[in-house]
Amino acid sequence: MAATFKGGFHIRDYKELTKDIETHALPDCDVHIFPMRQHIGAPLKAIVNVGDKVTVGQKIADSKEFVSAPVHSSVSGTVTDIKPYFHDSGTMVDSIFVENDKIYTVSDSVRPRDYKTMSREKILSVIRESGIVGMGGAGFPTHIKLSPKAKVDYVIVNGAECEPYITSDHRYMLENADDIIYGLKVAMKVLGLDKGYIGIELNKKNGIESLKNSNEFEGNIHIIELKTKYPQGAEKQLIKAVTGRHVPAGKLPSDSGAVVINIATSVAIATAFKTGMPAIEKNVTISGDAVNKPSNFRVRTGIPVSFLIEQACGFKETPQKIISGGPMMGITQYNLDYPVTKTTSSVLALLHAQKTYDAEAPCIRCGKCVEHCPMRLMPLKLAAASKKDDLETAERYNVLECIECGLCSYICPANKNLLQHIRMIKPEVMKKKREESVRNGK
């Protein structure tokens, strides 16, 4: 029986558009744009200047802060500008522009390493210097995730890929199975574990078989079949399904004895040691009913999304909505000029938004948002508190535990955008708690 968690909902996944399409490399792009914000943590500063020559894999931005991960050039060429530019967060971010010379000269710093002969500290240093982050979208620096303060018993590679449309991780399973398991083995050594786990939803059975047939597959690697259900790929839900453990409220996954890394992150770790190349490349799905040729591409970071759309033969007609990421948790975009970063997993173009919130009706107290909430919260109560700016009630109903999966809004028959109200009050509750901590001297 497939492992799972309580709550959630099976959403039509639309993965048939791209799941059987091989990942293709892209032709040369003239200019690559590298935002200096591609991770959760301290902002980066450019360590190159306009006019400098750079090479593939060369570090071009970094920070001295611990919670950070450097950015590297994915092409060789000339730095032509450093200025604020469009970012998929919807803001302008300081970015480095590199004119691609299309020679792809590799940096002298790129060289393979044998993790088996290295200390834990050295492995973590390589992961940090390779700029590896949570490449499924979160962007949390991986060297920190693999340095938990609590004792860890499980390391899990997240192969759920539960968001509709996205198939970039599925293609990694079919085309880079050795790298996925190799990266997991590196993480196992860092954490001092002799077993590793990969959780995969049952709608990817050929991905499961591909991993089991991998040259790297051994008896200490356990593939856990997961029920196909959203949001099975959320960290806390994945940990519950694989280990049976519950992550305590307000705690990190490592506090339950588990660490989770993404499929693409595991591949990036393998690449950093096998070839020495930092995180400069990843799979990206281009999909949606507005796209002429839905595709999976192997993408060098810094390529403008407009270039990817061109390679997918453009749009059938003007899309109503363009989303970076999945339709449930992705961010709606207002143009196609933003570049691919380490956390870009997909770009969706939809002719018709699947749900709008223009005709919100009164709550009918059906309880569907409570029944399906994967965090066992009461979204209707949280949304009501948000409308009244009632921070105490929102905190009492555990608003900070919301993972913002969007399922409450999706499932609501009254067409209420519950998530949007929750998103509005969460920062205010967090600010209130910080101020209380300061007053209490914590």
Image (cartoon, rainbow, N blue to C red):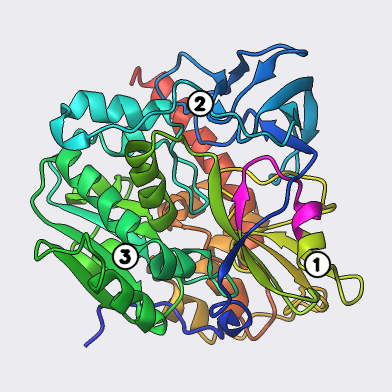
At label 1, which amino acid type do we have? Answer: Lys
Q: Going by the image, does 14 lie left or right of 10?
A: right
At label 2, which amino acid type do we have? Answer: Pro
- Percent x, y for residue 265? 41, 48
Label 3 SS? helix
Q: Residues within 10 Å of mark 3 (few under 14, many from 20)?
A: many
Q: CA distance from mark 1 to mark 2?
A: 32 Å
Which span is picked out in magenta? 298-308
Q: Nearer the viewer, residue 277 or 71?
A: 277
Q: Is residue 304 magenta?
A: yes
- Percent x, y for residue 306? 81, 53
At label 3, which amino acid type do we have? Answer: Leu
Q: CA distance from mark 3 to mark 2?
A: 28 Å
- Percent x, y for residue 183? 29, 49
Residue with the mark numbered 3: 238
Sequence-wise, the earlier of marks 1 and 3 is 3
Confirm or deny contact between disc 1 and disc 3 (CB under 8 A): no
The answer to whether residue 293 is visible is: yes
- What residue sits 19% from the left and 64% below the top? 217
The answer to whether residue 244 is visible is: no
Residue with the mark numbered 1: 321
Residue 91, relative to residue 373: is it above or below?
Answer: above
Snapshot quadrant of residue 262: bottom left
Q: Nearer the viewer, residue 72 or 110?
A: 110
Residue with the mark numbered 2: 70
Front: mark 3 or 2: 2
Confirm or deny contact between disc 3 and disc 2 (CB under 8 A): no
Sequence-wise, the earlier of marks 3 and 2 is 2
Label 2 SS? loop
Confirm or deny contact between disc 1 and disc 2 (CB under 8 A): no
Sequence-wise, the earlier of marks 1 and 2 is 2
